Amino acid sequence: MAIEKKIQDILSSIDNNEFTIPEFQRGYVWNSTQVKEFFRSLYLGYPSGSFLIWKTKEPSKIRGEQKETNSIFHQLILDGQQRLTTIYTIFKGQTPAWYEGVALRTDLYFDLNTEEFEYFMQRKMSNSTEWINVSEFLSKGGVNHFISNLSSFSEENRNYYLNKIEILNKLSAIKDYGYYIKEINITDLEKVVEIFNLVNKTGTTLNESDLALAIITSNWPEIKDRFRESIEVYRKYNYDLSFRFLTRCLNILTTGRGKYTSEISNVTKEEFEEAWKKLNKILPHLINILRENAYIDSSDDFSSVYVLYVLVYYLSKRDLKFENTEEANKAIYWMFMALLWGRFSGSSESFLEKDMNILKEKDSLDDLIHEMYLYRGTNLYLRPEDLAMQGVRSRIYNIFYASVRAQSAKDWTNPALSLYSKSIGYNNKLQRHHIFPKAFLYKKYNGNNSIHKAMINEIANIAFITQESNMDILAKDPGEYLPEIDATQLRKQFVPTDEKLYTLGTYEQFLEVRRELLCKGINEFLTSYFPNGEQSGIPSDLKHYDEKIEQIELSLRDLIAEKLDNAAELDGYQELVPQHLKDKVEAKIKSWISKNPGEDKSQFLELRRRLDFFDLQEYFDLISSKGNWSLFEETFGSKGTLQTRFSQLGELRNSIRHSRGATDIAIKDGEAAISWFNSISRSTSNLPISEETE
């Protein structure tokens, strides 16, 4: 059966609750361009399809509030929701009761000169006679109401609109546009869903997730209400989950597949309910772990939610939670590596299936990590060159933020404030800050040059500070404002503390040093979760370098212990080691003790033993700290030179020990650093004199 109705009559049917939406329908998805083109078609009288209505006495669950009507039948829209929602919203100035989905703008304007539709633009349309608000025009009664108010306009405008009366009549006539409405009378809900799926494969294409949700809803009509309740709860904690995300999770938990397949049609309501119960135990546990242990403040910090699907599946095969911190940290390590190296940036579903199959066969996070090594084709750690020209859209950016949060970094001008992306108050809002301000760099670099622009906006020139600090610093010369910032807070964001690098002429050198520090900081952050990642043996031709570096490290510990113990009144460790270094070392010692419970804990009372848990950067931080530099200045001379030599030594050591292959430059720089430290040994007996490098 098919009848024809004008738009004005369809609007009345919606107001009288004659037309409703079945819950298994997806929400509103049209974008602004689609709305604009749709109204253009209505204005020109072009065909725009028909509506398919399911007429039934016993409908499935209806979206929105279900109100009583005098009719014994319910008329549910199967095809045409996007058009009907658009028509109703523009004509009425508000969305219908069933509305759900993306934002629908009502500021659609019409140009009486060109007869084109556009969304409001302040500069173009303000105080322009030819542009009228379509929603306001139609909702107030169209041309009749418009003409009745002409007396309120100036004589010039009245004459203009009277000359455009034919066009105004044509715009108003949209209400008389006729639609054919086809009705179907079927009692089998599954058949209705099948029809819905078929008719919606044209027009704005439904994706597989929409179709899967339609199938789930036909079996379990209340599921969307469950989704909405959960989405609101997670949103309070800055995790903005979607119907699409939750649908994929249910598919994974019921079918054991990452991809959508016909298997979901065979899942019963009881099986969906059981999967939903599991998911509501898994997600809170997982999100709490990510917020607290991985410093992921919100869902915005994920470049791909596919890592969450893998972890949801992994936990579903366990006891719906991580057994201990070690297991949780290993999962975080895998997750960060998958995000860092774009595991799901291409064929997302294929890699999701592959990772789920690994868990089916091995049930092991170690095997997932091993797969990442195979996927990457080399070690998983960052190199300074990986950061070159990378901006805030890079996959590195979110991990950079997490690694800064892990340092318990504070604001630069108000150190009482921690750096947190969800801080309350406008002035406390976290912002990205160009260490070398853009305006300062534009004195030398051309912002229109793509290479210069990438250099200016590189991650290596970014730090995190509050809105208040950003306003305070603005475009100041880094040579003026950076020395005033607490050096500890600079180091916690991996910013070089050598003031010689803070000039316009040394900006590119600053970037090089910052990349090295960032690299080291992020890699240490990652290895704090899983320190024994896959590594190949040290190449035989580089082994002698590794041995020399190890000797330098041992002697540095001896030198530091001697200097601090001699300078301290009672305890060199408690009195002279900065707190942020103590925090790191205590965590390492605690981890070591947990793995070696039979060892004597009293050995860690000595400063020298604690120094065994410091790394090269931490040696430098300890030596160069404000309270300690005077103890070491005579030995090492320039603090800037010392930092460069530590960076060179660290790059060679990391290249060797992380099996990423030492470049000729890394080897030459490393040789120079080894020679430099050996030359220092001529003035102290603590550093070894080894043979000169060739």
Image (cartoon, rainbow, N blue to C red):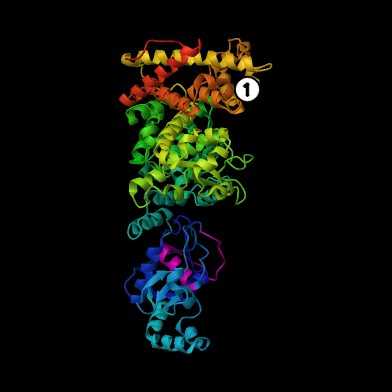
Amino acid type assigned to the residue bearing label 1 in the image: Leu
Q: Front-most of 448 and 263?
A: 448
Q: Residues within 10 Å of mark 1 (few under 14, many from 20)?
A: some
- Quadrant position of residue 581: top right
Location of the N terminus by quadrant is bottom left
Q: Residue at x 56, y 50 (%)?
A: 471
Place of residue 511 in the rendered image (x, y in percent of width and height, measured from the top left): 42, 37
Q: Front-most of 34 and 583?
A: 583
Place of residue 489 in the rendered image (x, y in percent of width and height, measured from the top left): 56, 35
- Quadrant position of residue 509: top left
Place of residue 226 in the rendered image (x, y in percent of width and height, measured from the top left): 54, 48
Q: Front-most of 361 and 586?
A: 586
Residue 364 seen anywhere in this rendered image of the structure: no
Residue 597 vertical position relative to residue 666 in the rendered view, above or below: above
- Quadrant position of residue 201: bottom left
Magenta-span inclusion, residue 46: no
Magenta-span inclusion, residue 69: yes
Place of residue 125 in the rendered image (x, y in percent of width and height, measured from the top left): 44, 73
Residue 614 vertical position relative to residue 75 in the rendered view, above or below: above
Location of the C terminus by quadrant is top left
Number of on-image labels? 1
Q: Front-most of 134 and 400?
A: 400
Q: Residue at x 45, y 24 (%)?
A: 646
SS of the residue at dot 1?
A: helix
Residue 263 seen anywhere in this rendered image of the structure: yes
Q: Is residue 567 left or right of residue 43?
A: right
User: Circle 1 is placed at which residue position?
Assistant: 576
Q: Is residue 388 left or right of residue 472?
A: left
Q: Which residues are magenta?
A: 62-91
Q: Is residue 263 left or right of residue 619?
A: left
